[in-house]
Amino acid sequence: MRMPRPHDLIWLRDPQAFVAEAAAESWPEWADAAWLARAPVVVRRDHDDAGRIPVGLRGVTRAQRYGAWLPAEQCARVVTPGEVARQARWRDHPRRDEIPALHALAQISRSLDAHAAAGHWHWGLTGAAGFSLASGIDVLHAGSDIDLLITAPMPLSHDDAQWLADLALSAHGVRLDIQIATPYGGFALAERLRTGGRVLLKTDRGPVLCEDPWRPVVPTNATNATNATSAP
């Protein structure tokens, strides 16, 4: 199995052992073994020389977030944002007509598929929508956003970047947050369009301000924290 990447969802092999080994004085009560037997953890951006995976635990509310380190042998199943998108479970979701984000996904997914194929990039779902659709744990509400991850091994063309920006403005009344993943890290599309190029690139060694996120100068010093809560 390949090393999980930021935004991937991981189901644990032995939640009880993980909680027993990792639980510190500040460990949240909601993140117990019963919850982690159902809920996947999400890979975040950080680095550990011992090979542990930086993950974020999430509960049913926005306030329930916690950063932890996961031993690689605890990975029972990994689902990528792209796999969530390809599964397209919004099509038969029981609350599709109640949740604007699910309705919007049904409207924009075919266009995303077509543009991604032509532009040699991939798209996936992260955030609450990705978590809910992958796990079956419904944390969505009427105001939920759509968090898109565009994985682009090569620089996006100007036309593709502009098309994505236009898509975000016409997502059927739903806020569309678009992150671009390069081989070196991730950045916000809106920031690159606003500045004309320069962005804050999130890497596993820390944030890097760069003109070209496909050719950054990445720092080599890692600053890890046991209870890091940084986003992927």
Image: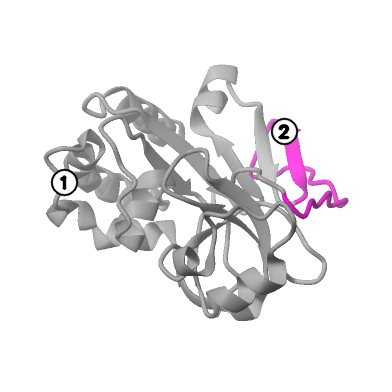
Q: Is residue 214 left or right of residue 1?
A: right
Residue 30, compared with residue 33, is above or below; it is above
N-terminal of the pair, mark 2 or mark 1, is: 1
> Whole-percent x and y of residue 16?
57, 76
Residue 143, compared with residue 1, is above or below; it is above
Q: Of helix, strand and loop, which one carries label 2?
A: strand
Visible residue check, residue 156: no
Q: Give the residue drawn at x 65%, y 40%.
A: 213
> Whole-percent x and y of residue 180?
51, 42
Q: Quadrant of the N terminus?
A: bottom right
- Give the residue type that dot 2 points to: Cys
Q: Which residue is mark 2?
A: 210
Q: Give the residue drawn at x 39%, y 36%.
A: 160
Dot 2 alpha-carbon crowd within 10 angstroms: few under 14, some 14 to 19, many 20 or more: some
Question: Which mark is nearer the camera, 2 or 1?
Answer: 1
Residue 32, compared with residue 184, is above or below; it is below
* In-front residue for pair 137/78: 137
Residue 14: numbered disc = none
> Whole-percent x and y of residue 107?
17, 39
> Whole-percent x and y of residue 106?
17, 44
Q: Of helix, strand and loop, which one carries label 1?
A: loop
State which region is magenta: 205-227
Q: Give the residue drawn at x 73%, y 39%.
A: 207
Residue 3, compared with residue 1, is above or below; it is above
* In-front residue for pair 154/79: 79
Q: Which residue is mark 1?
A: 95
